[in-house]
Image: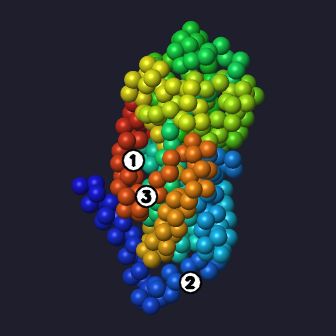
Amino acid sequence: MRANVAARLFIRHGLSAALLLTPAAVFAQADNYPSKPVRIVVPFSPGSPIELPARAVTQRMMETFGQSFVFDYRTGASGTIGTEAVARAPKDGYTMLITNCSHSANPAYFKKLPYDAINDFQPVSQINVTYGNLLVIHPSVPAHNVKEFIALARARPGQLHYASAGIGSPPHVSAALFAAMTGIDLIHVPYKGTAVAFNDVLGGHIEAMVASPTTAVPYVHAGRLRALGIGGPRRQPQVPEVPTFNEAGLTGFDLTCYHGIWLPAGTPQMIVRKIYGEVVKAVALPETKRMLAEGGLIPVGSSPEEFAEFLLKDVVRQAEITKQIGLEPQ
């Protein structure tokens, strides 16, 4: 049933723009694409984990298409400000959205979004999936594994804090689910972006964060942070000594994220396919795979149809997580 819905959405979005153009005009538009710089909207602050996969695939497109792909950071409201800008953009392929799993999570975290996360967008490709976020703490915190951190939090209820990139962001959801499943009372401190949140953990102003390995691993290796566990189904190759939450005794914890590319709904399908073709080639490059692996990311490169189906399922999954962590929509 969901696959049929995804297919209908995909076809409807693709045809809506094409109906406004003659076949010859549509072909000419696709053949000449891109004939000017393309804007990449990133709805989070510079330095967020989104940048690594975004730059990996856009570098390939710049080389192939011979055009600039310019990053436009539209931050705020857990990614919804930048996302809305893409939903309202012209349907010509010159404005793209590259973001993370907040796209399919935000419908559950906000009572009313200024866009429809499914119907206002044309999925292009899921670039990657993550291993899950790392629970990291400042070295001054007297805990060396997940069990010790849980015991410390129970001994000091409401006294330990965790940072996030904002309400509904992957670091927030991961930490809130961790707290809910362990029955501990942690204080959430939301920031406007990953970089500023992470800096306060590095500085010891905030005790903990459930952060992307892309951001956290270099600081773990440098001894500036201590990694206690990872929230996905398998260990992260760059920190193989860090157990999964399941291995640490938190049975059933499996929360991974993703990064992907969207266009406004109604973008001509020949342009969608042209972009998708380059994304798949980029993800398959050994250099891209190496970059993603070093950032703790697993390449995917799905088709628009596969990504559409994946997103429908993830919206349902995120709604279930919202109920589990007791988060009231804003």
Residue 85 image-quadrant placement: bottom right
Q: CA distance from mark 1 to mark 2?
A: 35 Å
Asked if the residue under mark 2 is in contact with the one under mark 1, i.e. CB atoms within 8 Å, the reply is: no
Above or below, comparing residue 78 to residue 58 in the picture = above
Q: Which amino acid, by three-letter code, is at mark 1?
A: Val
| Residue for point 51% across, 25% down | 243
Residue 302, disc: 3
Q: Residues within 10 Å of mark 3 (few under 14, many from 20)?
A: many
What is the x, y in percent for residue 74? 64, 55
| Residue for point 49% across, 63% down | 280
Choose mark 1 or mark 2, whichever is in front.
2
Residue 32, disc: 2
Q: Hey, which residue is sitting farthest top in the picture?
A: 155
What is the x, y in percent for residue 141? 67, 17
Choose mark 3 or mark 1, whichever is in front.
3
Above or below, comparing residue 317 to residue 252 in the picture = below
